Image (cartoon, rainbow, N blue to C red):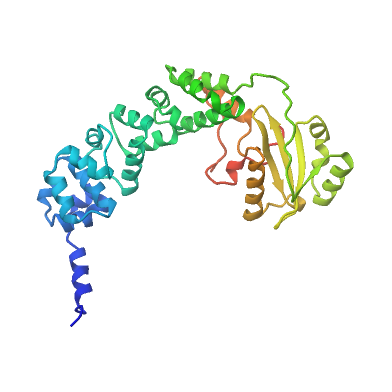
Amino acid sequence: MGTPMTLPDVAALVQAAPVTSLLAFLAGDHAAAIARIWPSPHEDFLALPAPRRHAAAMLLARGDIPSSEVAALAMRARRAEIAEAVFGGEAPAGLMRAVSRMGEVLWRAEDYARFLRLFAEEEACLLIRHTKVLDPAALARIEALPPPLRQPAILGCLGADEAAMADIVAAWAMALRIRGAAAAPAIAQRFGRAASAAALFEMARQEMQPQAFCAECPSPDLLAPFEAVRSLDALSMIAHEFRNCLREFVADIASGRMAVHVWRGEGGPAAVALRRDPGGWRLAEARGVGNADLADAPLRAIIKAVEGAGVRTGESWNWLYRRIEDRACEAAPLPLPDEVSDWRRALFLGNYWD
């Protein structure tokens, strides 16, 4: 006779199993799914050791394991079997020991996913094993570091200081840009010998310094729809067209510290200024006629094109270097502009004179 019309309502009632306040506190987003397996008052689940409760939540977060199997694994399986099920295959050694340091309250599904992703990486796995108190914030700090910098000594120097973490990551990226990717192992090894935050930032300051002075660094060739401005007459015409102050930068352009292009793609035109510092060429400005802000689409197109030509975007070498130097001297570092997480602000456009 077919599927009864009342079945969806019955299923909805089953899904809406009662959740006690204690389970809601301990399990958070997982409470409803756990209540369907271990009905109120959830004694069997609450009696489990914390690592097995975390394992149950991770198994449920996978979404491909039957409820009966989740219950059997969490309540009766050996630790190795649980680790294999949680990891979805052969698990690295020490996974359940790490889970035992996750505390009593269950994590969000995305935090568990981050844990499993990081535990699969050799450097991060070693760090996690050395972390005494494992929580989502600790994992976020590990994930913020590039893999070569995921070392106990480096993380110990930085602690929970997110701004310091961001600065060392930026200094690492700048050092690699100046010295080349082949220098990464040596730089990471040196950073790993730091005994204090000040020592770490002094190392970073030294690695950011170019090894050769006055090295030739011609401005990059930007293809159409870019037009290079290579003469005083052309610069005067562009300054008139865009009604801006580019004419004031003659000395910098003539000396090779600055390059100006006009971008005439869709959503343009835009006057584009590149600035050369010890870290190479950087996108310093991109504006429309009358210094108008560009819409998102043309600005993103310009960013993609200049990055493809080897031009970096973001903070200038000078501002980053001064901040790293302050940290090395244990002085208060220069503050970052507000809301640097915003992609436009993170470009640091408009810094001509640094």
Foreground residue among 252 and 2: 2
Foreground residue among 333 and 156: 156
Q: Position of residue 291 (x, y in %)?
A: 74, 49
Residue occupying image coordinates x 79% and y 32%: 252
Q: Residue furthest right?
A: 233
Q: Position of residue 265 (x, y in %)?
A: 72, 54
Q: Quadrant of residue 63?
A: bottom left
Count of numbered circles on the image: 0
Residue occupying image coordinates x 77% and y 41%: 260
- Can residue 214 be seen in the rendering of this structure? yes
Quadrant in which the C terminus is drawn: top right
Question: Taking 162 as reference, is 323 left or right?
Answer: right
Q: Position of residue 156 (x, y in %)?
A: 38, 24
Residue occupying image coordinates x 39% and y 27%: 159
- Can residue 105 be seen in the rendering of this structure? no
Question: Taking 100 as reference, is 135 left or right?
Answer: right
Q: Is residue 314 above or below residue 24?
A: above
Foreground residue among 70 and 242: 70
Quadrant in which the N terminus is drawn: bottom left
Residue occupying image coordinates x 43% and y 17%: 193
Q: Quadrant of residue 9?
A: bottom left
